[in-house]
Image (cartoon, helix red, strand yellow):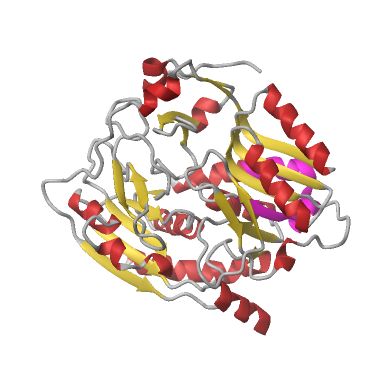
Amino acid sequence: MSTSLESSWVSDTFGVLLGGDGIGDLVRLGLRRNPKRAHLLVSTVLGKHIPTDPALVRGAADRLADLVIEHIGVEKSSAATVLGFAETATGLGHCVADRMGAACYLHSTRRCAGGVSVTATFEEGHSHATTHFIEPTDAALFTPDAPGTEVPLVLVDDEISTGATALEAIAALHQQYPRPSYVVASLVDMRDADQQRQCEVDAAELGVSVEFVALAHGSIDLPKGFTDEVCALAAPALNPVGPVTGSLETVRIPWPAEVPDGGRHGFLRTDGPAFGEATAAVSAAIAGVLDTSAPAVVVGHEEFMYLPLCVAEYLAQEGFTVRYQTSTRSPAYVLDEPGYPLRRGFEFPAPEGDHSAKRYLYNAVVDAADPRGSQVVFVCDRPADTDELYGSGGLADVLARAGHNVIVAVVDTPSQQTLRAAREAL
């Protein structure tokens, strides 16, 4: 593999070297003060940390899906179940499943609410939130069509760093729903030769075939003492305040009880048409309250990524200047420095669940030269519509204080129990 070293503020300051064909088109080097893993590969096509043209997000996912289709064939692609990893790859996985015409899409979740049945769990060691839950309405969604079926389970993540998370997930799922083969698809694959061999060893111990496909393969060289240097950095300046506080408007939008809002509880290929109709209605309601003269950043809520992406696509088709990204559970290092991808950051309490936990949003602007010139549309599901979202220090509040006009669009999406009941009634 030929190697191209990408220059950036991180590489220039700390000597970190990022190499690989095509890697520089897909990721930029960021930091996080985390002793487990101090570097962060910030995707330019995922729509997580960087506000991204929704067409770029969809296009990258389509290219990845095409690699999977080429690898396993059209017939198996249409029969496959696709699993996306929370939180960053839930939208990516759904886009891949769309392109494949997959029979079922499901994503793992970090949200484990009371009364929700969990089919399986697995761990992600270096993550800020390590436990993934699998919560389909029916465990049969994960069961192969027939014993010994040769249709692989397709797992989708934005980045494969070591392969350990993918193999951990496969081991957990294989114990309950065994099948002979798996495909792991990612935007970038950063495994070195030893890590690739370890994945082969782990797959052999399970008695399964595990194949990896990616848009680009790369490498990263971290100098000695890098993690200690990053962890010793001063705390970043977060929650910028503008000279004028922006406005805040909330729009609550209904959603059909029988239609999944995404892949958290399973999304069948047959759900696509009804989902499209419901999403168009949500998008039209949001378009009706937007300022047509100002650019907009559509922000999804953590792993609630796919529906907000579809909203951004709709707005772009309607002529809005729009970018798309989501909030996150993971703290990253913010620095207003040319060549660094995380120029602004917001910290706020988790809207749902443990309100003492912190959540984050980065950049949140269409034009970095005009940080207050973008209206922000925060699209969330019903559990996030809490006092903590709007109160002092909440996400809506800190964005408005930064000068953004904020629209909170709450989609009244179905719970696992409601969706299960609707499916059982069909």
- Residue found at x 47% / y 58%: 304
Residue 78 lies left or right of residue 421; in this view the side is: right
Q: For the C terminus, which image quadrant?
A: bottom right
Give the camera-side residue of 214 and 86: 86
Residue 211 appears at what percent x and percent y? 75, 38
Q: Residues in magenta?
A: 64-84
Residue 404 lies left or right of residue 263; in this view the side is: left
Q: Is residue 78 magenta?
A: yes
Give the camera-side residue of 346 and 53: 346
Residue 290 appears at what percent x and percent y? 28, 61
Give the camera-side residue of 378 and 219: 219
Residue furthest to the left in view is 243
Residue 1 appears at what percent x and percent y? 66, 18
> How many discs appear?
0
- Residue found at x 51% / y 47%: 88
User: Secondary structure of the magenta portion, mostly?
Assistant: helix
- Residue found at x 62% / y 16%: 2
Q: Quadrant of residue 34?
A: top left
